[in-house]
Amino acid sequence: MHEIFNSAAYREAVLQFDRASEGLVIEEGLRERFRRPQRALVVNCPVRMDNGEVEVFTGYRVQHNQTLGPCKGGIRYHHQVDFGEVAALAMNMTWKCGLAELPFGGAKGGVAVDPYTLSQTELERLTRRYTAEILPLIGPNKDIPAPDLGTNPQIMSWMMDTYSMTQGYTVPSIVTGKPVIIGGSLGREEATGYGVAYVTEDAVKKHLKYVESPCAVIQGFGNVGSHTALKLNDMGIKVVAVSDATGGIYNPKGLEVKKLVGIVRGKGKPGDYRNGDNVTNEELLKLECDILIPAALGRVITKENAPNLKCKIVVEGANGPTTADGDDILGDRNIPVIPDIVANAGGLIVSYFEWVQGLQEYFWSVDAIFDDLKKRMKTAFVKVAEHAERDKTPMRLAALKLGINQVAKARELRGLYP
Ligand code: NAD
């Protein structure tokens, strides 16, 4: 377990916890508990590849805290996944659930694999084996996985099927983010990106009142990035650049978002869109714009590039895209950051709706889902913005403080076992 403290991502999560919880009444022993995960499983999954050979993939499931309810958190497939990163993301999930006032604790999972190098059959075998390996931890009342970077509704279907086979009956509420036909929720696929867009709309009203027609740059054009772009486009916010792992495309007059989504979903890349200039991911972050939305990997806004960003606000679609020193520089430059636990909570919120619908086997209309999602996102934004203004702190600290306080208060009420 101690190896997580060698991870920069984990150390940063602890640092942010320490900064945000300063001034909260939490006894030191419990504070120390919050700095560590509750439990974690490291699994090595042997998978028969299409060429007949066996390859071993290392995976993780980390549960940080379940004071508020069963654990909730996505599964990430990426070649750089490691124990520390997963543990950091799990901790962040705890505070995100607290802030959103949902009855969940924080968890996260991941497998160190580049999913784009695997065939569908290899991906299915890996997913089934990984699910079987983490069976001791997961369950609809224990720990409910969801999609994250590199995973999708198909992968959630295989996870649900594998779990259901071990129980002998169908258990839809074991995962969220599954296709609607097998018990998924309407709106779940769009939820994180739409949530980012709703919060961006509020942030524009608050911080960019004097900008006539604000424009946005988005890094990452997968689930979160593409749905954010589509919704911003509907709202009349011009998207001028987007990228994926292969690079980006920029046109200061605005991109045709629907066309780009069609290209990328058709297995193309942003660079295949003709009406713009190609940019690298590093160049994209430094483009002149009003709103910068990192929606891919963590730790992309750092002390190296933060002095050169030319945006007026940052809205964090990705988890942990800004390092602590990058954050300090943006603070010194008066560039407000709408932190991940506020901005990208839409997926978690509709996952909660999906879990509730699955347990009840009663499904809601898409309008009911988006109305409730919008209400909750806007309430969280206002709550955090007011808190930040009152305490004269950045929104990240205010959001974390509110999330941590919720968990700490619940812990106090529940007391300490035994
Ligand atoms: P995804 O796999 O659907 O898309 C990821 C995108 O990032 C792809 O366009 C990919 O090409 C791009 N990318 C990968 N490596 C890159 C690199 N080095 N530079 C630039 N782009 C790169 O994943 P997603 O679900 O959209 O998740 C994106 C981020 O949002 C992650 O940080 C994830 O933790 C966070 N998030 C996702 C959800 C969700 O519901 N899916 C919810 C909350 C937060």
Image: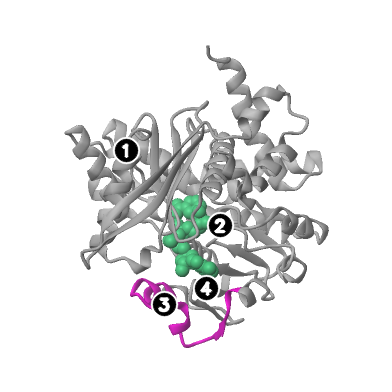
Q: Nearer the viewer, residue 5 or 353?
A: 5
Residue 184, given in percent of the width and then of the height, sits at 30, 46
Foreground disc of the pair 1, 2: 1
Q: Which residues are magenta?
A: 260-281
Q: Dot 4 lies on which element?
A: strand
**Disc number at residue 174?**
1
Residue occupying the point 31% across, 65% down = 118
Report how far apart the C-alphas of labels 1 and 4 lie in the structure.
Answer: 33 Å
The answer to whether residue 194 of the structure is visible from this angle is no
Q: Are marks 1 and 3 in contact (CB under 8 Å)?
A: no
What amino acid type is highlighted by mark number 2? Gly
Q: Earlier in the sequence, mark 3 or mark 2?
A: 3
What amino acid type is highlighted by mark number 3? Lys
Residue 323 appears in which quarter of the rendering?
A: bottom right
Q: Earlier in the sequence, mark 1 or mark 4?
A: 1
On screen, residue 109 versus residue 380, left or right, reads: left
Q: Residues within 10 Å of mark 1 (few under 14, many from 20)?
A: many
Residue 138, given in percent of the width and then of the height, sits at 36, 35
Residue at numbered disc 4 = 243
Q: Nearer the viewer, residue 338 or 239?
A: 338
Foreground disc of the pair 3, 2: 2
Ligand 1: does it lie within 8 Å of the C-beta at label 2? Answer: yes
Residue at numbered disc 2 = 317
| Relative height, residue 300 to residue 405 (above, below) | below
Report how far apart the C-alphas of labels 4 and 2 lie in the structure.
Answer: 14 Å
The answer to whether residue 288 of the structure is visible from this angle is yes
